[in-house]
Amino acid sequence: MNNNILIEDFINGIPKVELHLHIEGTFEPELMFQIAKRNNVSIKFNSVRELKDAYSFNNLQDFLNIYYEGANVLLTQQDFYDLTNAYLEKIHSQNVHHCEIFFDPQTHTKRGVNFETIISGIHEALVQAKEEKGISSNLIMCFLRDMDIESAFNTLEEAIPFKNWIKGVGLDSAEVGNPPSKFKDVFDRARAAGFITVAHAGEEGPAEYVRQALDLLKVSRIDHGNKSLDDDKLVDDLVRLKMPLTICPLSNHKLRVVADLKNHPLKKMMDRGLAVTINSDDPAYFGGYMNENYNAIANALDLSKEDIYTITKNSINASFISDSDKLIMHQKVDNYMEHNK
Ligand code: ADE
Ligand code: ZN
């Protein structure tokens, strides 16, 4: 028993599960420049420093502009492998044991990159991480909500031959003006094909979008969901449904969803009975991976070890792994808690 362990050490050591992570958002500037060079693609910025200096955002769209710009240098299967592998090495050093990874095929297919090239590179890195590091994973394919539904349907068709590699579908990109209702038909088709569904909702958009994600897209998790708190009846329903929210503290701060992490609603959400989880979203752009996100919010809200324990347990329950694998993860976390109270 180690009664004196600091909250930071406790967080860094506890086995964690990540549920909200865009692989394109893990593109570190150094790797971006390296891949741009080998692909002979130019970048708008002259140096890593200049690029990093541009990482100052007033809202989601500001960020998305740079995020899509960065993704433009990804062309080959090797590029997608290297990108995914770098993320997996990083989380291995942070005691993340399982991750559920978003990828945005349309960002690449609209530039002429084949669907197979994208998914094969990502998949190869995931298989290798399971064998060599013991990290398990699921892939979630996101539709870009600022593109039309025909493009989403085409993307779903392209995914069908790789169905065994993809657990679910999601919805991301510019939220306001692109409600979940726009994608009801393609989500119906995806569920009929056997995909689990999730959606970004209530990040910048209203609580009504969270309601639509539940009722129309039949999601199993809400990504972000911050704006849910504006609607008491919605919160009651989310609690009753045990609907997980994938909260991303540093993202919320960088994109000004919250002005100050000290005002982040995460603890309020927990006290209301919501199943909150902590995740990194786009760590290369927002200043931190899982441990940095956990530590930042723990410091800002003075979270206890019990709070951290509860959140990691929520993440296991909210993941798309089998019940037997959940049991193994729960035992790891319980064992850690027992020895580090
Ligand atoms: N794509 C990558 N990160 C995103 C976010 N935080 N919200 C919506 N779309 C995204
Ligand atoms: Zn996201």
Image (cartoon, rainbow, N blue to C red):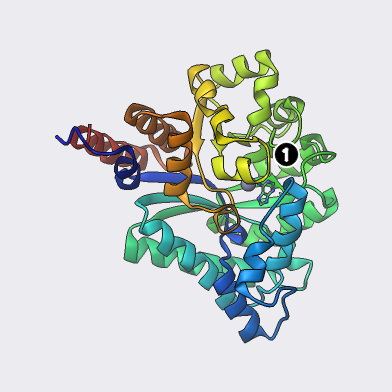
> What residue lies at 55% left-to-right and 49% top-to-bottom?
167
In the picture, the quarter occupied by the C terminus is top left
Residue 302, by quadrant, is top left
User: 10 Å neighbourhood of mark 1: few (<14), some, or many (≥20)?
Assistant: some
Camera-nearest residue between 159 and 144: 144
Q: Amino acid at mark 1?
A: Asp
- 248 in relation to 89, above or below: above
Residue 278, percent across and down?
49, 39
Indicate left or right for 122 with 339 as reference.
right
> What residue lies at 75% left-to-right and 30% top-to-bottom?
209
Where does label 1 land, which residue?
188
> What residue lies at 48% left-to-right and 62% top-to-bottom?
87
> What residue lies at 38% left-to-right and 37% top-to-bottom?
323
- State whether label 1 is within 8 Å of ligand 1: no
Q: Is residue 248 visible?
A: no
Indicate left or right for 139 with 182 as reference.
left
Camera-nearest residue between 44 and 181: 44
Indicate left or right for 333 with 21 as reference.
left
- 95 in relation to 294, above or below: below
Q: Is residue 184 visible?
A: yes
Residue 318, percent across and down?
48, 35
In the picture, the quarter occupied by the N terminus is top left
Camera-nearest residue between 64 and 114: 64
Instruction: Count numbered badges in the picture.
Output: 1
Camera-nearest residue between 30 and 197: 30
SS label for mark 1: helix
Residue 76, percent across and down?
63, 78
Residue 147, percent across and down?
83, 52
